Amino acid sequence: MPDLYFRVESANPVPLAAQPLIGFKLHISNLPPGETIHTVNLRAQIQIEAPRRQYSAAEKGLLLDLFGAPDRWGKTLRNFLWTHVSTVVTSFTDSTVAELHAPCTFDFNVAATKYFHAVSTGDIPMLLLFSGAVFYANAEGALQAAPISWNKEARFRLPARVWREMMDLYYPNSAWLNLRRDVFERLYRYKIDRSLPTWEDTLESLLAAQEEVIPQ
């Protein structure tokens, strides 16, 4: 029966995709040697291991929205789910390299986006938990299927720059803001009433008014 082992070799932005993606190059090896694997239907849950790194003062400030004040991080700083990914690995013997494409979003209602945006330097610790099914030939050549063991996992430290490079590739010098419909309508009316040409001008106007009320 196959016994698969997984190791993430690298991760990079995927250019020219329909949505922002980070591609993880995944090295897969199998024991016993010489056994032919026909197909692997592979699934992975990717978690961010937030407690496994240090944070600068600036990063702590940006993470308030996610974990609260740093003096509470002993209770609030925990691993959390980033995403689920899947792929079909084609036939190989002994080992192969597959690619996992992790979808990303610039929606700041999503915890992972807040985290990636806050962490500007160093690496982001990740844990990949694998599941799925392996299709292989037994000693008599008959096709067999076996589940991937529940304890198969791999750790990887994603350079923080990779996420930023990917977002710069898909959204150069821009960001997305998701608003409730009634709030958007009020903002749109504000824009129209003042003949403001762009959304940047609209927000600049509101921010300037707020700064007059609360001097910096």
Image (cartoon, rainbow, N blue to C red):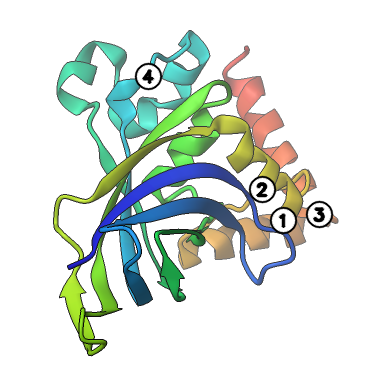
For the point 66% across and 33% down, which residue is it? 207
For disc 3, the marked residue is 198
Total number of numbered discs in the rendering: 4
Residue type of the residue flagged with mark 1: Tyr
For the point 15% across and 50% down, which residue is it? 151
Tell me, for residue 166, which label it has, or none: 2
Q: Position of residue 156 (x, y in %)?
A: 41, 36
| Eye-nearest disc, 2 or 3 | 2
Measured in 3D between alpha carbons, the distance from the residue under mark 3 to the one under mark 1, in whole angstroms, is 21 Å
Tell me, for residue 170, which label it has, or none: 1
Circle 4 packing at 10 Å, graded few (<14), some (14-19), many (20+), is few
Residue type of the residue flagged with mark 2: Met
Quarter containing the C terminus: top right
- Name the element at disc 3: loop
- C-beta proximity under 8 Å, tags 2 and 1: yes
Measured in 3D between alpha carbons, the distance from the residue under mark 2 to the one under mark 3, in whole angstroms, is 25 Å
For disc 4, the marked residue is 53
Q: Earlier in the sequence, mark 4 or mark 2?
A: 4
Quarter of the rendering containing residue 2: bottom left
Measured in 3D between alpha carbons, the distance from the residue under mark 4 to the one under mark 1, in whole angstroms, is 28 Å
Quarter of the rendering containing residue 55: top left
- C-beta proximity under 8 Å, tags 4 and 3: no
Measured in 3D between alpha carbons, the distance from the residue under mark 2 to the one under mark 1, in whole angstroms, is 6 Å
